[in-house]
Amino acid sequence: MDPLDFTEGEFYQDNFDSRAYIDTFYSNPSGHTDENYLVFALQRLSETFSSGKYKGQRLIDVGSAASIHCVISACAHLDHIVLSDFTDRNRAELSQWLCKAPGCFDWTPVIQQVCHMEKESKSPVEVEAVLRQRVQSVVKCDVRLENPFHPLTQEPADCVVTSLCLEAACKDFPSYCDALRNVTSVLKPGGVLVMIGALGESFYIVAGQRFSCLRLTRSNVEETLRKLEFSILDFNVFKNASVEIKHVSDFEAIFYLVALKSI
Ligand SMILES: C[S@@+](CC[C@H](N)C(=O)[O-])C[C@H]1O[C@@H](n2cnc3c(N)ncnc32)[C@H](O)[C@@H]1O
């Protein structure tokens, strides 16, 4: 794709329908029926955080859109959670959920699914309450900036989570490498990066609007992390069993990785 035609952050600000996105992809704990990778992602997140290996003070989710699914399993293990996104509407939708505004998105089915996976004694209502209490702030971020949270400065984090954001935000591979460096610059030495991403995806659709995606390979991702001196501890791949169905996206696979920043 010509990088000039790529839908970058400014296009998201004007055209990304936050509510349609979560309605489409997160109303059901299995995700969208054409895609089916949500259970895979929730299961991996659950295994990572319930292992007890990744605890600490601060977690930053980069490019959250209006979604909280990436921090449900983490919220019992990290005290302060920061959600972030480029667009005003995504951040407004998250703030509405945080303050239980009337009509805010109902995450109960997804939270129930996570509780079911973790066989925890806490009920979905209790988990949601912990999550709301631990999400400290919802901030603007732009992964293209050296400090993605400019003009704010984030304190170094024990954990950075990012899901399906960088390949949506970056028009070419050099920009992707820069963005990954920018995003991981907020991690403490020895901190953990949890990243979910799409392989071989060129577009996805929200409410009839097409958004570009940078087509990545597994070695693109691994090579970038190696250059940034991360140790990859876990790299899982969920293959799209119905690549011929391209109503909402054309991803070939979803990856889930856990990597440690060097000390
Ligand atoms: C496919 S959504 C992923 C959202 C969510 N993390 C998930 O897993 O469903 C891509 C997100 O990237 C955000 N985005 C696009 N350009 C960005 C940029 N330059 N900096 C930060 N976020 C950006 C969009 O606003 C959108 O919310």
Image (tube, rainbow, N blue to C red):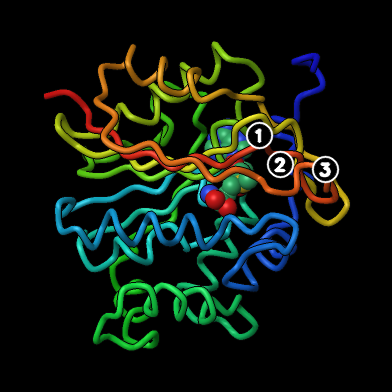
Residue 91, image quadrant: bottom right
Q: Amino acid at mark 2?
A: Tyr
Q: Mark 3 or mark 2: which is in front?
A: 3
Q: Is residue 130 above or below residue 198?
A: below
Find numbered disc 1 in the image and state the secondary structure of the residue it sits on: helix
Residue identified by numbered label 3: 244
- The CA distance from mark 1 to mark 3 is 28 Å
- For the point 26% across and 58% down, which residue is it? 49
Residue 226 relative to residue 149: left or right: left
Q: Amino acid at mark 1?
A: Gly
Residue identified by numbered label 2: 12
- The CA distance from mark 3 to mark 2 is 27 Å
First reached walking from the N terminus: tag 1 or tag 3:
1
First reached walking from the N terminus: tag 3 or tag 2:
2
- The CA distance from mark 1 to mark 2 is 5 Å
**Quick one: label 2, few (<14), some, or many (20+) residues within 10 Å?**
some
Residue 68 relative to residue 161: left or right: right
Ligand 1 near label 2 (Cβ, under 8 Å)? yes
Q: Is residue 262 above or below residue 2?
A: below
**Quick one: label 3, few (<14), some, or many (20+) residues within 10 Å?**
few
Number of the label disc, if any, that sits on residue 212: none
Q: Amino acid at mark 3?
A: Glu
Q: Are marks 1 and 2 in contact (CB under 8 Å)?
A: yes
Ligand 1 near label 1 (Cβ, under 8 Å)? yes
In percent of width and height, residue 135 lies at 34, 64
> What number of labels is visible?
3
Find numbered disc 3 in the image and state the secondary structure of the residue it sits on: loop
Residue identified by numbered label 1: 9
Residue 189 relative to residue 45: left or right: left
Find numbered disc 2 in the image and state the secondary structure of the residue it sits on: helix
